Image (cartoon, helix red, strand yellow):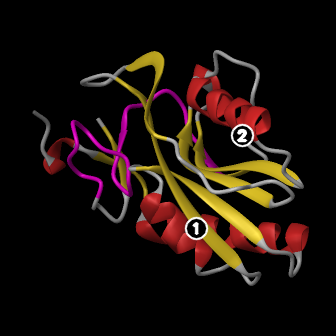
């Protein structure tokens, strides 16, 4: 089991807040005053989505789904597990998927494909706080991302180690 003192600081709370503010500005510019449906991938993205939503100026609806691709410990299983993927009618809506991190891309691709298969959205975009391009295994990139990361196991600000440390206000690595 790792402890907080095992973590090395990667992104401070201030750097994260600044990245989220800039993402909010970009999203506001792209959508203007049009309604937007945020689809948050639980559990990791909830802190990010809440903070991001504070910077968005348009009418918002927040939806939550649970997907997982991580096994235990430090590695991704590569398999997407659907825990709860019930969504309201998104036909004709502007939809923004909000995720904490995109690494292999399997979860992102699964969710984009699922929404495209089940709905005819007005627009569908993907927003991730962190983009780990070096680990990408499928052809998908976020429309918006806050910070690029290399191949480290990250913990904090929604990211966990065996369910713990999501509550840290910063992002560290082991």
* Percent coordinates x, y for residue 22 in the rendering: 71, 69
Tell me, yes or no, if residue 141 can be seen here. no
* Among the 4 quarters of the image, the one containing residue 173: top left
Q: Examine the residues drawn in magenta and state their main secondary structure.
A: loop
- Residue drawn at (71%, 56%), measured in percent from left and top? 89
Asked if residue 155 is positioned above or below residue 45 in the image, the reply reads above
- Residue drawn at (17%, 50%), measured in percent from left and top? 4
The range drawn in magenta is 146-166
Q: Which of marks 1 and 2 is nearer the N terminus?
A: 1
Q: In which quarter of the image is the C terminus?
A: top left
**Which residue is the site of mark 2?**
115
Would you say 37 lies left or right of 122 here? left
Asked if residue 94 is positioned above or below residue 119 in the image, the reply reads below
Would you say 79 lies left or right of 174 here? right
- Residue drawn at (34%, 65%), measured in percent from left and top? 169
Label 1, label 2: how far apart the Cα atoms are: 15 Å
Q: In which quarter of the image is the N terminus?
A: top left
């Amino acid at each position: 089991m790792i402890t907080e003192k095992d973590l090395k600081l990667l992104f401070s709370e201030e750097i994260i807040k600044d990245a989220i503010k800039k993402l909010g500005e970009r999203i506001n510019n792209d959508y203007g005053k049009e309604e937007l449906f945020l689809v948050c991938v639980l559990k990791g993205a909830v802190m990010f989505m809440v903070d991001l939503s504070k910077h968005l100026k348009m009418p918002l609806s927040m939806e939550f789904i649970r997907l997982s691709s991580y096994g235990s410990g430090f590695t991704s299983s590569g398999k997407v597990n659907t825990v709860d993927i019930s969504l309201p009618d998104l036909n004709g809506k502007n939809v923004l998927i909000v995720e904490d991190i995109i690494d292999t891309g399997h979860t992102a691709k699964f969710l984009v494909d699922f929404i495209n298969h089940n709905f005819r959205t007005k627009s569908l975009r993907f927003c991730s706080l962190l983009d780990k391009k070096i680990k990408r295994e499928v052809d998908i990139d976020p429309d918006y991302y806050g910070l690029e990361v290399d191949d480290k196991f990250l913990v904090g600000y929604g990211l966990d180690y065996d369910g713990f440390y999501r509550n840290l206000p910063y992002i560290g690595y082991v």
